[in-house]
Image (spheres, rainbow, N blue to C red):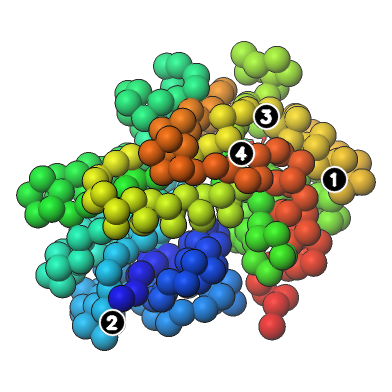
Amino acid sequence: MAILVTGGAGYIGSHTVIELLNQGEEVIVIDNLKTGHKQAVAGGAFYEGNLRDTSFLERVFRENGIEAVIHFAASSLVGESVQQPLPYYENNLMASHNLVSTMLEHNVKKIVFSSTAATYGEPKQIPILEEDSTNPTSPYGETKLAMEKMFRWCDQAYGLKSVSLRYFNAAGAHPDGMIGEDHNPESHLIPIILQVALGQREAIGVFGDDYPTEDGTCIRDYIHVMDLANAHWLALKSLRENGASNVFNLGNGKGFSVKEVIETARNVTGHSIPEKISPRRAGDPALLIASSEKAQTALGWKPKYNDLRTIIETAWNWHKENPDGFLGKK
Ligand code: UFG
């Protein structure tokens, strides 16, 4: 029986495909390649298509014995979602509705779901616990939270078992440098900093230095993409072993300010990486740090890449070798 990975050509999806293959799983990938890269898919069967296309989904389920689904496919930019909410409802909620309907028709009742810290909104306490209140401040966070809830109601009604994984700031690349982060346009902090180190940009804009933090810049909890990938495998294992639906935060439990990230990247790359202070970006909370104790206890998850320098080194290795991302790859 195979594991279906939706969005398996995307950043976190493609790293999870490698983890699954290393664990000896049979993998089927679905991706519409709108933001994903075919070259990032290390193995398994590949279907290009859209989750909103029910006959396409039906065909994938008919042609394969699918045991469980790991669901990444989604639109995932906070800022864009505020500007254009409707595609987020369509690509995230409607697509997930189709996916779950098809799963249930084929009696597939296990799903691991790519959720986000954006489900919490502005946190009331740090570190953030899974039972803290969820008040998303963007359609992105709102649709991810709605999907988590849809899965829970489907557990009660149809016995669909789900594990929702709320990631904090995914970063880094596969340690072999085979695959890494490649968004176009790029909006995430670490890849943009590394583009400055590569000479592709002049400076990194620091979005606000007047936050109530020690150096005035926003603090985030950076977690390595291979540690996230491993958590998906452990979540799948937990569904196989005890079958209980659950939700987990995934982070390192340590926060780094934007300035600290830039300084670490200067040390890793040996480049001066000029910075310029820019206005705040709308919707950025000052401080986001996860408590991942629940995942550590219940799933036995233990992040391996738990220092920022290693995370940035793996990202730098990828960006240096692939300055044009997957475009430059055969
Ligand atoms: N930042 C800059 N300059 C940049 C880019 C980012 O200063 O050019 C700052 C941001 O203001 C933020 C930090 O760097 O303080 C990290 O920003 P990212 O865009 O890398 O990541 P976010 O924290 O905004 O987003 C992440 C995930 C989202 C998730 C969100 C939850 O990428 O999917 O956390 O809040 F929804």
Of circles 4 and 2, the one toward us is 2
Q: Which residue is mark 2?
A: 64
Q: Which residue is mark 1?
A: 268
Give the spatial CA distance, label 1 vs label 3.
Answer: 16 Å
Of circles 3 and 2, the one toward us is 2
Give the quadrant of residue 11: bottom right
Q: Residue at x 70, y 77 (%)?
A: 329
Q: Is the N terminus in the top left, top right, bottom left or bottom right quadrant?
A: bottom left
Residue 328 vertical placement versus 69 (above, below): below
- Viewer-proximal residue among 212 and 80: 212
Q: Earlier in the sequence, mark 4 or mark 1?
A: 4
Badge 1 marks a residue whose secondary structure is helix
Mark sitting on residue 222: 4
In the picture as drawn, the residue positioned furthest to the front comes out as 241
Q: Which residue is mark 3?
A: 256
Q: Residue at x 20, y 60 (%)?
A: 109
Residue 325 position in % (x across, y down): 69, 67
Q: Check disc 3 and give the amino acid type.
A: Phe
Q: Earlier in the sequence, mark 1 or mark 2?
A: 2
Give the spatial CA distance, label 1 vs label 2.
Answer: 45 Å
